[in-house]
Structures are given as structure tokens and as C-alpha cells.
């Protein structure tokens, strides 16, 4: 598959992101202290919003956010309900660069495949060959949604390949966790599956769960096996599978799959597939759904821009130590095209990409109480630092800066979804920071009243900025797709597997290597 169109598209998208950098790399905690509303929104857009009512602005945001194809976007541009040309142009451009819209656009849909059209090459449907697993083994509902759709897709995808070449194969499920996907592939579709996870206690839990299901279905458990290992681009998956041929019989090829592989694990899987380095048994297919873009480590860190993510190497899971190497490779960018541009996103952009515009558009409501409290707290802390004498001032400013750079700030101060009152929130936050809190409850109430008008502005800004989230995801996933194509693997594309409201990271990167 030619790459010129994809390179041109990526160039356009990253140019657009750079033009929106004032929004993209703003920080919600600094909304009040840095007057983000006045300083970060492009001038013409700010003028339009300031002329519009709050309700009119939200209506425009929700209307455009719900459009999912290019024709609908064009129609909206031709007849907007209010005079806000600059705002509409920005929002429409964001939507045009989302994977959802690109998948239906004539020039770019070659890089996508549909999983739903019967008889189409992209339709990879296979009926279950075993009884359904009881819902109690697939909780919560989000996981049931993901596993049911992805297991059917992978089974069809893989079985067509095996039937075409009259060979046998096995699936390796990377980051398999408790084995939801792997056991579904094995027990529903009769596919040999090796689940690999970095934590031994998680692999053990997957084994226990699978044995319970097998007893319920009166099945043997040999089709689904578990292995504890840290996966890198150098991992010999073929060697791991070969160890199981005593139970499985001969295996001719491997399909590498992953459901929501976290941070750098996603690109590691892509690189492992493209390297063709598996000994004995080749990796012939890939189906990977990534997640946790905020945990991606970037290759390029511009001088003075210290916001690289920490490597996604969990020191512990459920209290159990995890043995992992320290030589992880940065996961973005992957393609030579973006590497040659020294392209970087930044932590704020990656954090944003992990959020869900689709859910906000579906629910059409958003609570900004927590955002308002945190922004108000930041303003208080900055005022406290500015009024303090040295060395206290320098210590506090350094602490605040480190919180923003490391992405580890105040964190949750209440259990569940409970939102504390502002005074109690301030009290707990100061205690967590090791600072003395001297404001009275009446002082805090007066402050809330003074800055109350920021709440509506936070809501509008938050939603408008979130339009950029799918654009950042587009860059991340198209970079991975381009990397595979650059490696000479021509059959590669993106497939929308899930309902994005239920499972926001809904696109799978799929590829296969044909046998000569």
C-alpha cells in the first residue's frame, strides 16, 4: 500500500495541532491563576464566544461533536445556527481529523476496514463454536462489550488466514490480564491461545478463572495457557509458543493480539510484529488496541520542555513486585516519517488523548466542580507562593512546578465519585502538601463567590479543548500504521471494533503477512 497519502495526511494533522498549541498544551489546573480563558483561546474564536450566550456556545459544541462524516460537517458549515465562523471552522477541522470521519472519507478510507459488511473482505465474522460464557465471568459490562466483539473479529480474521494457507496457528494475547479475551477465543472459537502478562499474580488469576469456566462447561483447559513475561520488541514469541506444542500439536504461525495494551506496550507489540524476529514460528498477524496514551514515552524532548512521560513499567501490581528490565524504548513516534521531523506531542496532549469526546457528546452534560476546585486551589497556592518570603517562596514554587511536570498533583482526596466541599477540599489538599492552612471557612466562601463566573468558562473551554483529543489519537495510531507500511508490510489498516461511548479506545491496528 502506498504511503504518500498517509504521510501527507499526517503532515496536515500535525500542522493543525501545532496551530492549536495554545489550547492543546494548556493546563486546566492553571485556568484561573494563568487566566487561560483570555490567554489561551485564539483571538477571533474568543471574540465570537464572548458575543454568544452560554447556551448557544454549548449547542454549537454538542452539534458539531455529534457529526461523524464529512458530508454532515460540510452541511453544518454551510448553515450554522449562529454567527461564529471561526469557532465552527476550528471544531469542524478537529472532527475532520478524527479517525471516525477519516474512515469514511474517500481519500483516506483505504487505510480503514469495516468489520460489519457481510461478504466484504473486511467482514471477518465467525459464529461461536462453543456455548456462551456466563456473564458473571465477564464483568463489568464494558469488558463484556469489548471481549464479545474483539474475540469474534479476531477469530474470523485469523481463521480465514489459516484456511487460506491450510495451516495451524495460535494466538498470543499480550497484556492478557485475567484472560477475558484469551479464554473467549479458546472456549468460544476453539483457538489455541497463550496469554502473556507481566505480573505473575495476574497470570495466576487468569489460570484460576479459566479453570472455573472449563469446569462449568465440562471442557479441558489445554487450549488457553498462561505465561508470565515482560514483552519487548526483542521477545521471542515463537519460542514461547513452541514450548506448548506438546499440548497443542504443531503450530505454523502466531497472531499477536492485545486488548488495550497500556502505554509503551502497544508500540512494543507493533515493533515486535514488524521485526519478523520470532524464531521457529513466525508472527503472521497483528490485532492491537492500545490505551493509556498518557503513559507513552516520547523520543524527542525539546530543550526546556520537560514533560516526557515516565516509562510504563509498573513497580507493583496489587502489592506484588514485578520484575521488568529498565531498557524500555520510547513508544512515540514510531514511523521514520515523524522521527525525521523530531515530532513530539507533550504530556498535556497525551493526557488529553486519553479522554473521551464521544462520551461527553452522548451524555451532553459535564460536571466541572472538581476542575473548578482544583483551579481555585492552584490560584490560592500561587498567591501564597508570591506572598511568601525566601526560601519558602522558592520551595513552594518548585513543588508546584514539579506537580505539573510530573503529572502527580493533589490527586483524589475523596472516595469514589464524591465531591468534597471547597473548604474541606482545601484543608485536605494543604495537609497532603504539608502546608499550613490558615483560611477560614468564610474566606473560602467569599473566594468561591468571587470566582464563580469561571465555572461556565471552564465548561466551555474544557469541551472545546476536548475536540482535540481524537486528533491526537489520530496522530498516534496513524504513526503506528505508517511504521508498519514503512517496514514493507502492505496489508495493514485500522478497524473500528467498539462503540466509542462504551469503550473510547475503539480502533484496532490490524496487519498480516502473506505467505509467498
Image (cartoon, grey):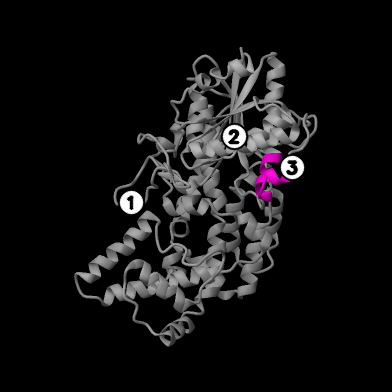
Determine crowd level at label 3: few under 14, some 14-19, many 20+ residues with C-alpha closer than 10 A: few
Main secondary-structure element of the magenta-colored stretch: helix
Mark 3 and mark 2: Cα distance apart in space = 17 Å
Give the residue displayed 19% in from the left and 69% down from the top: 391
Closer to us: 178 or 114: 178
**Disc 3 to disc 2: CB gap under 8 Å:** no
Q: Give the residue at mark 1.
A: 306
Q: Element at badge 2? A: helix
Question: In the drawing, what numbered circle is on residue 134?
Answer: 3
- Residue 130 visible in the current orientation: yes
Q: Is 308 displayed left or right of 240 in the figure?
A: left
**N-terminal label among 3 and 2:** 3
Q: Element at badge 3? A: loop
**N-terminal label among 1 and 3:** 3
Image quadrant occupied by the C terminus: top right
Q: Quadrant of residue 66?
A: bottom right
Nearest to viewer (mark 1 / mark 2): 2
Q: Give the residue at mark 2.
A: 207
Q: Element at badge 1? A: loop
Give the residue displayed 64% in from the left and 48% down from the top: 503
Residue 26 belongs to magenta span? no
Q: Position of residue 511 (x, y in %)?
A: 60, 28
Which residues are the magenta region?
A: 134-148
Q: Quadrant of residue 83?
A: bottom right
Question: In the drawing, what numbered circle is on residue 282?
Answer: none
Image quadrant occupied by the N terminus: top right
Amino acid at each position: 500500500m502506498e504511503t504518500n497519502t498517509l504521510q501527507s495526511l499526517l503532515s496536515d494533522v500535525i500542522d493543525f495541532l501545532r496551530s492549536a498549541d495554545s489550547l492543546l498544551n494548556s493546563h486546566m489546573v492553571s485556568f484561573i491563576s494563568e487566566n487561560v480563558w483570555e490567554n489561551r483561546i485564539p483571538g477571533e474564536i474568543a471574540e465570537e464566544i464572548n458575543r454568544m450566550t452560554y447556551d448557544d456556545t454549548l449547542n454549537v459544541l454538542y452539534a458539531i461533536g455529534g457529526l461523524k462524516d464529512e458530508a454532515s460537517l460540510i452541511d453544518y458549515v454551510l448553515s450554522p445556527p449562529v454567527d461564529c465562523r471561526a469557532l465552527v471552522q476550528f471544531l469542524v477541522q478537529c472532527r475532520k481529523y478524527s479517525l471516525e470521519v477519516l474512515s469514511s472519507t474517500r481519500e483516506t478510507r483505504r487505510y480503514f476496514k469495516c468489520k460489519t459488511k457481510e461478504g466484504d473482505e473486511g467482514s471477518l465474522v465467525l459464529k461461536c463454536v462453543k456455548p456462551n460464557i456466563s456473564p458473571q465471568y465477564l464483568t463489568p459490562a464494558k469488558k463484556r462489550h469489548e471481549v464479545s466483539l474483539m474475540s469474534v473479529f479476531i477469530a474470523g480474521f485469523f481463521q480465514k488466514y489459516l484456511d487460506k494457507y491450510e495451516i495451524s496457528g495460535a494466538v498470543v494475547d499480550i497484556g492478557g490480564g485475567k484472560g477475558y479475551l484469551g479464554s473467549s477465543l479458546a472456549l468460544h472459537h476453539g483457538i489455541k491461545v497463550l496469554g502473556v502478562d507481566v505480573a505473575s499474580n495476574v497470570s495466576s488469576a487468569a489460570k484460576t478463572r479459566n479453570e472455573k469456566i472449563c469446569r462449568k462447561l465440562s471442557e479441558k483447559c489445554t487450549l488457553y495457557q498462561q505465561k508470565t513475561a515482560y514483552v519487548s520488541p526483542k521477545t521471542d514469541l515463537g519460542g514461547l509458543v513452541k514450548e506448548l506444542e506438546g499440548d497443542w500439536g504443531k503450530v505454523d504461525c502466531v497472531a499477536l493480539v492485545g486488548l488495550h495494551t497500556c502505554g509503551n506496550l502497544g508500540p512494543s507489540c507493533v515493533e515486535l510484529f514488524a521485526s519478523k524476529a520470532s524464531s521457529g514460528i513466525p508472527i503472521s498477524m497483528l490485532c492491537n488496541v492500545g490505551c493509556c496514551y498518557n503513559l507513552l514515552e516520547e523520543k524527542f524532548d525539546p530543550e526546556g520542555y520537560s514533560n516526557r512521560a515516565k516509562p510504563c513499567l509498573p513497580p507493583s501490581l496489587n502489592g506484588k513486585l514485578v520484575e521488568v528490565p529498565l531498557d524500555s524504548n520510547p513508544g512515540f513516534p514510531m514511523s521514520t516519517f515523524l522521527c525525521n521531523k523530531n515530532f513530539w506531542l507533550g504530556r498535556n496532549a497525551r493526557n488529553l488523548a486519553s479522554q473521551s469526546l464521544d462520551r461527553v457528546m452522548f451524555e451532553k452534560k459535564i460536571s466541572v466542580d472538581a476542575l473548578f476546585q482544583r483551579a481555585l486551589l492552584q490560584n490560592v497556592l500561587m498567591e501564597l507562593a508570591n506572598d511568601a518570603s525566601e526560601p519558602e517562596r522558592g520551595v513552594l514554587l518548585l513543588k508546584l512546578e514539579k506537580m505539573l511536570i510530573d503529572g502527580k498533583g493533589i490527586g483524589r482526596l475523596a472516595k469514589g465519585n464524591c465531591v468534597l466541599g471547597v473548604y474541606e477540599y482545601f484543608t485536605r489538599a494543604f495537609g497532603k502538601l504539608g502546608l499550613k492552612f490558615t483560611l477560614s471557612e468564610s474566606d473560602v466562601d467569599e473566594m468561591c463567590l468571587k470566582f464563580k463566573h469561571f465555572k461556565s468558562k471552564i465548561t466551555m473551554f474544557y469541551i472545546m479543548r476536548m475536540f482535540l483529543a481524537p486528533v491526537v489519537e489520530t496522530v498516534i495510531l496513524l504513526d503506528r500504521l505508517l511504521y508498519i507500511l514503512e517496514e514493507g508490510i502492505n496489508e495493514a489498516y485500522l478497524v473500528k471494533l467498539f462503540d466509542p461511548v462504551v469503550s473510547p479506545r475503539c480502533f484496532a491496528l490490524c496487519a498480516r503477512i502473506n505467505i509467498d
